[in-house]
């Protein structure tokens, strides 16, 4: 498995993967300790409630989302951000088409294509 | 020192810090292993060449930048990203007003205000 991305990652050269429920994602930069992922939602699409042992921060690059983190639900818009400690339940519903930038520690190995 | 951010980080509630040379930044979500920072540049402002022991990924949320990573210079625009291994020299010049989303492993402790 490739454990390090290129240094320059261009949008138009980066494939989109199925992330479930119509949601799609691009794997941006990563090494074993850190991974950045761009996730594109259409209105009404959702990220189901889940948890993982990775620390996560999320930037709302565009759109509007109803986000639930650790039992609290708030509406977030472009420019806002979320933090999720390891193991914390979280999920979202897209209220207006938008892009989330997710960062994880350590990397999400299962997001990489099979070698 | 507070070693964990809130779960919800709202743009309008988050202070901007001086990042040098006119550049300003907001500290978004973080724990000891992961930190997300929003950095705002005006055209002509620069992030001087530097390196650090942290892994880093950067998302170009808006604008256009000339980025140098490990001796290679490329122009990146909204939607593109950069990856920097620990210790790699990197820097940028802003070509059109824009926002970068930087993520680090581990956190940048010196970015937090004094307790």
Image (tube, coloured by chain):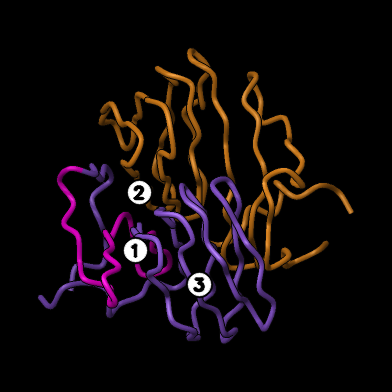
Chain colours: A purple, B orange
Can you identify the residue that label 3 sits on? A92
Side of B61 where B15 appears, left or right: right
Q: CA distance from mark 3 to mark 2?
A: 27 Å
Q: Residue lying furthest right in this view? A: B115
Task: Compare residues B93 and A94 and report the one nearer the observer.
Answer: A94
Question: Residue A111 lies in what quarter of the image?
Answer: bottom left
Can you identify the residue that label 1 sits on? A31
Instruction: Give the magenta-colored segment's residue range.
Output: A12-37
Side of A110 where B109 appears, left or right: right
Q: Residue at x 65, y 30 (%)?
A: B24
Task: Compare residues B43 and B70 and report the one nearer the observer.
Answer: B43
Give yes or no for residue A25 being in the magenta stretch: yes
Q: Are marks 2 and 1 on the same chain?
A: no
Can you identify the residue that label 2 sits on? B83
Name the secondary structure under disc 3: strand
Could you say where residue A14 lies in the image, as x and y percent from the top left? 18, 51
Q: Residue at x 64, y 62 (%)?
A: B30
Name the secondary structure under disc 2: strand
């Amino acid at each position: 498995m490739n454990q390090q991305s290129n240094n320059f990652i261009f949008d138009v050269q980066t494939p989109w993967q199925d992330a479930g429920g119509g949601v799609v994602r691009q794997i941006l930069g990563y090494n074993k300790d850190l991974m950045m992922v761009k996730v594109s939602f259409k209105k009404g699409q959702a990220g189901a409630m889940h948890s993982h042992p990775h620390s996560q921060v999320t930037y709302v690059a565009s759109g509007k989302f109803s986000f639930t983190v650790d039992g609290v639900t708030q509406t977030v818009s472009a420019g806002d951000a979320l933090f999720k400690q390891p193991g914390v339940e979280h999920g979202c519903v897209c209220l207006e088409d938008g892009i989330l930038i997710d960062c994880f520690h350590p990397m999400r190995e299962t997001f990489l294509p099979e070698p």
